[in-house]
Image: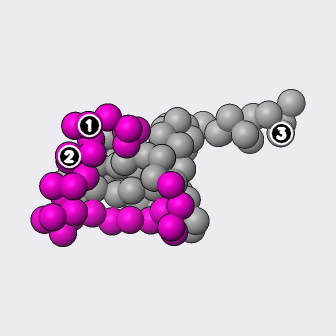
Amino acid sequence: MKFINIGYGNVVASDRVITIVSPDSAPIKRLVQDARDAGRVIDVTCGRRTRSVIITDSEHVILSSTQPETISWRLNGKQSDEEEEDDE
């Protein structure tokens, strides 16, 4: 089973991830609130601003302070933009 880092030492099983989205739109805000009411939210932001929302196949909603693009790069096994800049 492959795990991906979603920030601050937290990892999630990559085969359980359905989607990674930005938390800015109204439908995503409603989805997060509904999941919070149902007790399905996992907040791993460590008190920081939520930058991405990860939806899993078990309908859990994970809030992360890592950018969606960065998590996507990690999910696809590529380097993040920051790591690429360091290599150049």
In primary-sequence order, the first of circles 3 and 2 is 2
Q: Mark 2 = which residue?
A: 30
Tag 3 near tag 1, CB within 8 Å: no
Question: Which residue is at 52% across, 36% downward?
Answer: 69
Magenta stretch bounds: 20-49
Q: Residue 87, located in which quarter of the rendered image? A: top right
> Could you say whether the residue bearing mark 1 is in a helix, strand or loop?
helix
Give the CA distance from mark 3 to mark 1: 36 Å
**Residue 71 magenta-drawn?**
no
Question: Which residue is at 60% across, 37% downward?
Answer: 78
| Structural crowding at the residue carrying mark 3, measured as other residues with C-alpha within 10 Å and reported as few (<14), some (14–19) or many (≥20) | few
> Could you say whether the residue bearing mark 2 is in a helix, strand or loop?
helix
Report whether residue 77 is seen.
no
Image-based side of 38 in relation to 73, left or right: left
Going by the numbered disc 1, the residue's amino acid type is Ala
Q: Residue 86 got which mark?
A: 3
Tag 1 near tag 2, CB within 8 Å: yes
**Residue 42 magenta-drawn?**
yes
Which callout, 3 or 1, points to the residue nearer the camera? 1
In the picture, the quarter occupied by the C terminus is: top right
Tag 3 near tag 2, CB within 8 Å: no
Going by the numbered disc 2, the residue's amino acid type is Arg
The image shows residue 68 at horizontal and vertical percentages of 48, 40
The image shows residue 84 at horizontal and vertical percentages of 75, 34
Give the CA distance from mark 3 to mark 2: 38 Å
Q: Residue 83 got which mark?
A: none
Going by the numbered disc 3, the residue's amino acid type is Asp
Q: Residue furthest right?
A: 88
Image-based side of 87 in relation to 22, left or right: right
Which callout, 3 or 2, points to the residue nearer the camera? 2
Q: Mark 1 = which residue?
A: 26
User: Image height check: is 11 above or below 74?
Assistant: below
